[in-house]
Image: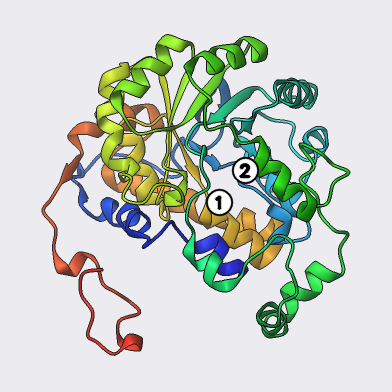
């Protein structure tokens, strides 16, 4: 049940599949005899701050649902790797607590809330907690139709239905972790309100009418580096730059919002062309391999956000699981860049468009690993 919450996309999950498949259409036309020596230099800047890796853990809600240590475990793992940390405004660890686990650069993610006093309060906490940048999530004005959650009767916290109790018995490690820990709250907003009571509050606070004027007000209140998260169109990217956002965050919310929204890696090059070389671009969506990160950097991203990979690690092993997930991607990225013939992130970004080429689709690119279990031979998904 929690697995499906983490793994799922919206509606028929077409965008979810396309977001992963899009990377397989991109070939890496490598240079040989590049004369490189491992390990390579993977350092770069994100939001103007030096980091050791060009990818980071995206802000994601409710990390304590996956493991008792939640956001604290993710922040500590990010600190050990020397990379950016992102905190969701629906986190289950308080804003000012994160500085105890991560002293490096941090970005705070904010939804489009109605209550401006609440927004001001949260922004003040983020500044107090040492957050260097703000990310406004603009693609969450309605809640996406996540049908796996509906089928499962998924609630936060569990409502202890018969189905949920059966699932809890089948997953004793998660159940023990959940029952032996203190009840979690969405601590960045109302740390004295349980998550079940807060659900209606969150729904009432999302503001579908939030527009560019509201964004201008928000930027004035924040007064620092800020990203618009959820950009998939050239015209929106240009408007965001005009409005005052320093960073474009190309994202479709993990394919969990609007079904058949585009794969982010597909729209990335056009957004880079539209905003020019000097505007910072972050991209997330469908990233599961170091080669995916490499392709995104080559096609215009300055940094790449990861979601599911580190959350799987968190659910499996807490801090060490997150650290291992980041390490796997670090090793894969180092290898991909070395084989491609690019020794630094800057070199990859400068030479990237000439190294990545799109090819036509093939049934062999999309092996359906669950096909035999459903009684047929497989093929394109």
Q: Are marks 2 and 1 in contact (CB under 8 Å)?
A: yes
Asked where in the image residue 319 lies, by quadrant, the reply is bottom right
Asked where in the image residue 76 lies, by quadrant, the reply is top right
The quadrant the C terminus occupies is bottom left
Q: Looking at the image, is mark 2 or mark 1 earlier in the sequence? A: 2
Mark 1, residue position: 326
Mark 1: which secondary structure?
Answer: helix
Q: How many marks?
A: 2
Q: Is residue 206 above or below residue 259?
A: above
Q: Is residue 132 left or right of residue 58?
A: right
Q: Residue at x 21, y 69 (%)?
A: 380
Q: Is residue 190 above or below residue 156?
A: above
**Relative image position of residue 92 (x, y in whole percent):** 76, 48
Work out whether residue 297 or residue 287 is closer to the camera in this orientation and state it: 287
**Relative image position of residue 212 (x, y in whole percent):** 48, 17
Tag of residue 81: 2
Q: Residue at x 25, y 28 (%)?
A: 270
Work out whether residue 224 or residue 28 is closer to the camera in this orientation and state it: 224
């Amino acid at each position: 049940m929690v697995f499906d919450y983490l793994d799922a996309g919206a509606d028929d999950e077409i965008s979810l599949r396309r977001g992963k498949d899009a990377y397989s259409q991109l070939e890496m036309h490598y240079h040989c005899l590049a004369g490189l020596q491992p390990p390579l230099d993977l350092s770069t800047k994100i939001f103007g701050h030096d980091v050791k890796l060009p990818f980071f853990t995206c802000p994601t809600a409710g990390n304590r649902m996956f493991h008792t240590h939640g956001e604290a475990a993710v922040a500590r793992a990010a600190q050990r790797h020397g990379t950016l940390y992102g905190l969701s405004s629906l986190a289950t660890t308080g804003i000012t607590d994160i500085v105890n686990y991560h002293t490096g650069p941090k970005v705070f993610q904010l939804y489009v809330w109605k209550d401006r006093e609440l927004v001001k309060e949260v922004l003040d906490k983020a500044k107090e907690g040492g957050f260097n940048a703000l990310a406004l999530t603009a693609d969450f004005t309605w809640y996406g139709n996540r049908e796996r959650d509906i089928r499962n009767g998924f609630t936060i916290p569990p409502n202890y239905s018969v189905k949920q109790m059966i699932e809890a018995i089948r997953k004793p490690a998660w159940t023990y972790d959940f029952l032996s820990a203190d009840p979690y709250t969405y601590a960045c907003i109302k740390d004295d309100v349980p998550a079940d009571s807060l659900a209606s509050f969150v729904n009432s606070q999302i503001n579908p009418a939030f527009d560019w004027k509201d964004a201008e007000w928000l930027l004035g209140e924040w007064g620092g580096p800020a990203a618009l998260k959820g950009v998939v169109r050239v015209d929106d990217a240009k408007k965001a730059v005009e409005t005052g956002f320093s960073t474009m965050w190309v994202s479709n919310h993990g394919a969990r919002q609007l079904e058949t929204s585009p794969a982010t890696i597909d729209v990335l090059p056009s957004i880079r062309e539209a905003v020019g070389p000097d505007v910072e671009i972050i991209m997330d969506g469908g990233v599961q391999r170091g080669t995916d990160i490499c392709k995104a950097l080559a096609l215009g991203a300055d940094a790449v956000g990861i979601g599911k990979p580190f959350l799987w690690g968190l659910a499996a092993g807490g801090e060490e699981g997150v650290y291992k997930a980041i390490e796997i991607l670090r090793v894969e990225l180092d290898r991909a860049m070395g084989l491609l013939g690019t020794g630094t992130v800057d070199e990859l970004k400068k030479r990237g468009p000439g190294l990545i080429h799109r090819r036509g689709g093939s049934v062999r690119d999309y092996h359906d690993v669950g096909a035999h279990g459903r009684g047929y031979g497989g093929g394109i998904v």
